[in-house]
Amino acid sequence: MEWWLWLAGGLALAVAELITPSGFFIIFFGVGAIAVGLLAALGVVESIWLQGLLFSVLSVASLLVFRGRLATTFQPPPPIAMDSLVGVLAVVQESLSPGVVGRVEVRGASWSARNTSDVVLRAGQRARVAGIDGLLLTVVPE
């Protein structure tokens, strides 16, 4: 097989890794193809069966050695645990009568919240998150 076909295939696989959410699988086959293409261009590997064997070995070996490291390096941060907001202080953004839904600010973000107490919460007053129901916080005065 021509060396430039290996390089073109390797580059195509690398691009496919970039445009698909494959989770770092395709790139290693691209690296294997590029390596075989370079070795074929240098005249180190000439027979097609040896190129195929070398491609397979290099691709699987690099997958086994490097995928775990890449996956942990580029892993997105875990989502915020919603239960961790219980007990956190909130600042009321608009007056909330008992049982009424309005807006509060928690950790710099605006949330919908229901006043579950018996008193009116005024704008700017501090409240405490008492619970969570889906995306609706329940708040009580501090």
Image (cartoon, grey):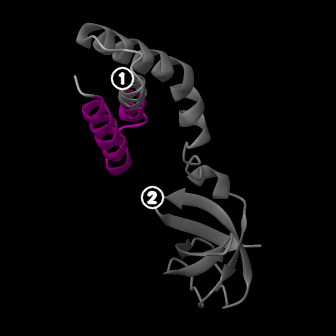
Residue 26 pos. (x, y %):
35, 33
For badge 1, the amino acid type reads Ala
Of 34 and 39, the residue lying toward us: 39
Q: Residue at x 32, y 8 (%)?
A: 50
Is residue 5 toward the left or the right of residue 99 in the image? Answer: left
Q: Residue at x 65, y 58 (%)?
A: 85
**Residue lying farthest front?**
43
Mark 2: which amino acid? Gly
Q: Can you identify the residue that label 1 sits on?
A: 40
Which residue is depicted at the point 72% across and 63% down? Answer: 88
N-terminal-most mark, 2 or 1: 1
Q: Residue at x 41, y 21 (%)?
A: 59
- Mark 2–mark 1 Cα distance, whole angstroms, equals 59 Å
**Vertical relation: 41 (above or below) 55:** below
Is 57 situated left or right of 118 in this image? left
- Queried whether the magenta region covers residue 4, the answer comes back as yes
Q: Does residue 67 show up magenta in the picture?
A: no
Q: What mark, if any, has residue 3 been given in the picture?
A: none
In the image, the segment drawn in magenta is 3-31
Question: Which image quarter: residue 124?
Answer: bottom right
| Residue at numbered disc 2 | 134
